[in-house]
Amino acid sequence: MGDGSKDTFNFFERKRRIISGVFLLAGIPFLLFTRPGWPEGGIIDLALRYGGILVILAGIAGRAWCTMYIGGRKNSQLVQDGPYSMCRNPLYFFSFLGGLGACLVFENLPVIFLYLVVFSLYYPFVIKSEERRLEMLFGAEFFAYKKQVPAFIPNPFVFRVGGKAPADARRMAKTLLDGSIFLLFIPLAYALNMLQAGGLLHTYWKIP
């Protein structure tokens, strides 16, 4: 692997954290001063709230599944089994689900829209940078894999279990701990809803 590819990937990784921070800051005013216009306990309220929780859990479980397969093989072997048989970047896909679920539990349409826009504009560059690194590491093997497996949206019809996944307990624990951050948004959403419903936090705009 050339230093230029590594530096490019590290650049996007650093910017990823900055972009995430900017997104959170931009979303705070919407969360604090707007609230859903649909009735609490209605079908839209329940669908977004509990759907968001399910999406968060799917994101956390998916991230752990990816870690179970890729283990410490990221730079030594091109993993093409399990979640990596359905798409080339499953860890980013499941991270996307975790973030989307966190937005859904707040039931705030501008925040959901902002998240989708930020992700769709920035993450393609992160993925391309990562794939350039894999091209340099694995060459023809990666190009053949690239032709068969989609980049981001999983294709369940090409799924294969493959051989024994080299699960690493330490890596799994770290992935689950990192993913648990998404769970923190659930009590935050409930607390925010209680403050707004009780009039302790004034809202200026009901959406829609």
Image (cartoon, rainbow, N blue to C red):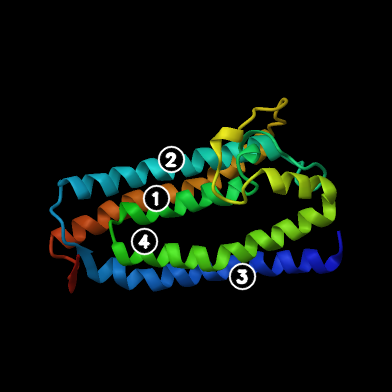
Between discs 1 and 4, the one toward the N terminus: 1
- Contact (CB < 8 A) between labels 1 and 3? no
How far apart are the alpha carbons under marks 3 and 4? 21 Å
The numbered disc on residue 112 is 4
SS for dot 3: helix
Residue 23 image-quadrant placement? bottom left
Report whether 57 appears left or right of 6: left
- Contact (CB < 8 A) between labels 1 and 2? yes
Q: Single out the residue that lies furthest toward the top.
A: 164
**Label 1 neighbourhood size at 10 Å, few (<14), some (14-19), many (20+)?**
many
- Contact (CB < 8 A) between labels 3 and 2? no
How far apart are the alpha carbons under marks 2 and 4? 18 Å
* Disc nearest the viewer among 3 and 4: 4
Coordinates of residue 105 in the picture (x, y in percent): 32, 52
Q: What amino acid is at disc 3?
A: Lys
How far apart are the alpha carbons under marks 1 and 2? 8 Å
Question: Which quadrant: the N terminus?
Answer: bottom right
Coordinates of residue 117 in the picture (x, y in percent): 45, 67
For this rendering, which residue is in front, 70 or 167? 70
Mark 2 highlights which residue? 57
Residue at the spot x=70%, y=29% of the render? Answer: 165
Q: What amino acid is at disc 2?
A: Leu
Residue at the spot x=35%, y=47% of the render? Answer: 52
Mark 1 highlights which residue? 101
How far apart are the alpha carbons under marks 1 and 4? 9 Å
How far apart are the alpha carbons under marks 1 and 3? 22 Å
Coordinates of residue 44 in the picture (x, y in percent): 21, 49
Residue 6 image-quadrant placement? bottom right
